[in-house]
Image (cartoon, helix red, strand yellow):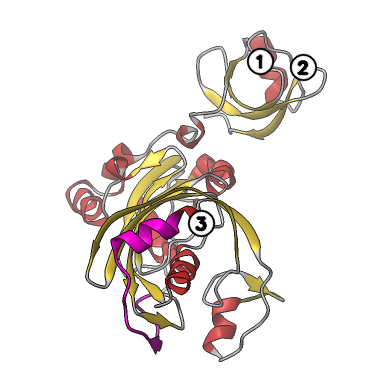
Amino acid sequence: MAQVKRIRRNVSGIILLDKPLGFTSNAALQKVRWLLNAEKAGHTGSLDPLATGVLPLCFGEATKFSQYLLDSDKGYETVMQLGQTTNTADAEGEVLQTREVTVGRVDIEALLPRFRGPISQIPPMYSALKRDGQPLYKLARAGEVVEREARSVTIGRLELLECEGTRARLSVGCSKGTYIRTLVEDIGEALGCGAYVAELRRTHAGPFELAQTVTLEELEQAHAEGGNEALDRFLMPADSGLQDWPLVGLSEHSAFYWLHGQAVRAPDAPQFGMVRVQDHNGRFIGIGEVSEDGRIAPRRLIRSE
């Protein structure tokens, strides 16, 4: 019997998922995409299976702006297990070394300033970074270790929230591309006892925070009660991740030309940088960049309804 092809819905917006423990980011995305029956979907940067918390899922037109969320600052809370190191730098790996823990709250707090501001990190082997088209974690599973280039990241916030026995809870605010596992491992080495990530929760991604998220259980419950369309109420606007960008309104005339790829002038445009653009009805129609002559050049456009 021939399979009937599922007709997917053309829905646009962002669902802020509180990613459950044990799911890859892609598995979480595909599950929500299925519940929503969405045609087009993408996520904004992977969270490890061990991690939970803020994972913006983009659907339809919102996928055009996922790169900008990917580039945004992130916030985390992590539990650091002192006294052991693992091959993955988290609780899922094999223990490589066990050392006595002779440090406490005072020692940790004295050390943290060294890790604030711009720091250099060597990405872990167990990461999704690619070497010759192969993700590093696949090479690591095969027992290979390859040289990785150090990269510069910025730690804007690093605070010790609590310390009990051989576990310490940290709050971290950081730039894109920061590996919390590497940060914890490096802090552990500096303390002389080693450490790995026992728990990791993302509390912020760009302008989004944990309080705004929805759980997979809530989405499944809504789907069970009202089908695909019952999930539409959880969709945030496609430009909700760009709320800190300047907003420029175009006249009907200017919007027409802008949507056809032409740079236009706007009275309220800033002197430079990226902007969100609305038409004369207040509808978000895309993002643009202010060029040297003051006109706004279109960069990504929203398809008209």
Q: Position of residue 271 (x, y in %)?
A: 71, 18
CA distance separating discs 1 and 2: 8 Å
Discs 3/2, front? 3
Q: Are marks 1 and 3 in contact (CB under 8 Å)?
A: no
Q: Secondary structure at mark 2?
A: loop
Residue at (57% x, 17% y) in the render: 279
Q: Which residues are magenta?
A: 90-112
Tell me the residue that label 1 is attached to. 269
Q: Are marks 1 and 2 in contact (CB under 8 Å)?
A: yes
Q: Quadrant of the N terminus?
A: bottom left
Discs 1/3, front? 3
Q: Position of residue 94 (x, y in %)?
A: 39, 87
Q: Position of residue 215 (x, y in %)?
A: 26, 52
* Label ID, residue 114: 3
Q: Is residue 117 above or below residue 52?
A: above
CA distance separating discs 3 and 2: 43 Å
